[in-house]
Every structure is written in structure tokens, then in C-alpha cells.
Amino acid sequence: MGKVLTPTLLLLISVMFVGALVKPVGNYADATGEYMTSPFVKGFLEGYLIRLIIKRK
């Protein structure tokens, strides 16, 4: 059963991923706040803080 189910699931996930890239549901929003001046630093720090919060629980 795994020989059929796993490739089928991977194919469905791939189709959904490509479909989302080709035809997204909405438009991309413009960057605001600190994301306009230094997007990498802001994203890195936000991700780091999320990891700290998850680790503490």
C-alpha cells in the first residue's frame, strides 16, 4: 500500500505547490515598517524570537 500511497501524496503536494506558484490566490502586499529598510535582519530576528518562545514551552 505504501508503494502507491506515498508517490500519490507526493504528486498531489507537488501539484498544489506548483499551482500556488503559478496562480496565487491574492496579490503580494508591499513591505511596511522595518521590512522596507532591512528585510533580512527583521525576518531573522523575528524567526529567532519565535524559536525562543517555542523552546521555552
Image: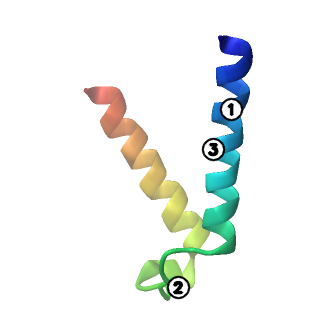
- The residue singled out by tag 2 in the image is 36
Q: Is residue 37 left or right of residue 5?
A: left
Query: Which of pointers 3 and 2 lies earlier in the amino acid sequence?
Result: 3
Q: Mark 3 against mark 2, which lies toward the viewer?
A: 3
Q: Mark 2 against mark 1, which lies toward the viewer?
A: 1
Which amino acid, by three-letter code, is at mark 2? Met
Callout 3 touching callout 2 (CB < 8 Å): no
Tell me the distance, in whole angstroms, between the alpha carbons under discs 2 and 1. Answer: 41 Å
Q: Is residue 15 above or below residue 36?
A: above
Would you identify the image quadrant in which residue 40 lies? bottom right
- The residue singled out by tag 3 in the image is 13
Q: What number of labels is visible?
A: 3
Which amino acid, by three-letter code, is at mark 1? Thr
- The residue singled out by tag 1 in the image is 8
Which amino acid, by three-letter code, is at mark 3? Ile
Question: SS class of the residue under badge 1?
Answer: helix
Query: Which of pointers 3 and 1 lies earlier in the amino acid sequence?
Result: 1
Q: Position of residue 45 (x, y in %)?
A: 47, 56
Q: Position of residue 19 (x, y in %)?
A: 65, 63
Front residue of 12 and 54: 12
Query: Which of pointers 2 and 1 lies earlier in the amino acid sequence?
Result: 1
Q: Is residue 46 above or below residue 24?
A: above
Q: Is residue 49 above or below residue 5?
A: below
- Quadrant location of the C terminus in the rendered image: top left
Sort mark 3 into few (<14), some (14-19) or many (20+) by Cα contacts within 10 Å. Answer: few
Q: Is residue 4 left or right of residue 48?
A: right
